[in-house]
Image (spheres, rainbow, N blue to C red):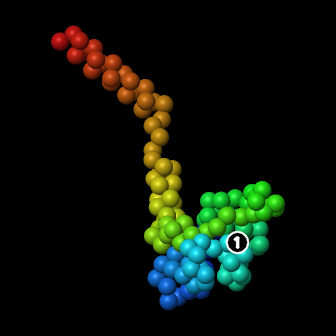
Amino acid sequence: MLARFRHWVLAEYPKEKKVSDCFKDWDTHSSSAITIGTFKSHVQTLDMTLDEKEYLFEGLSLQVEAWSEEKNRYAFGTLTRAELKFLDAWDPETEKQEAAAWDEQLHSSPIPDEQARNRSKTEDISVMYYAVAA
């Protein structure tokens, strides 16, 4: 979901070099924070359901929808440019390749068989015996 959002932003805002630069277009009131409504109005063409977009907003803003006594209703937090900045340096493709390489390394490592483990134990005992005897 996050990788799809990152890809969409870079495709939708080709003049911008960083994902977080889209925030300048979204923050039309120069308030340094945008609401869920503003976010949803700017990501209308993002191929996600409404629930996914709300979940994405909560994840990016690190503020879940919660009851607001002040507003007497459920309310979302706000999203700032700083909360998008990590997406500027994140490369999901590289991360995916690295994860696959680690997975391949883990599964291709030889696991010593029982005989090899026993031989190793015998050698260790022999070395210890000769070291003590000397």
- At a point 67% along the width and 64% down the height, the residue shown is 77
Q: Residue at x 76, y 73 (%)?
A: 49
Q: Amino acid at mark 1?
A: Ile
Look at 23% across and 15% down and name the residue there: 130
Residue 64 point in image, percent of width and height: 70, 59
Snapshot quadrant of residue 66: bottom right
Q: Residues within 10 Å of mark 1 (few under 14, many from 20)?
A: some
Residue 73 can be seen, yes or no: yes
Quarter of the image for the N terminus: give it. bottom right
Nearest the camera: 33 or 17? 33
Residue ranking furthest to the right? 72
**Frontmost residue, 78 versus 129:** 78
Q: Which residue is mark 1?
A: 36
In the rendered image, the vertical position of residue 83 relative to residue 41, given as above or below? above
Quadrant position of residue 76 = bottom right
Residue 25 x/y as whole percent = 57, 84
Residue drawn 23% across the image and 12% down it:
132
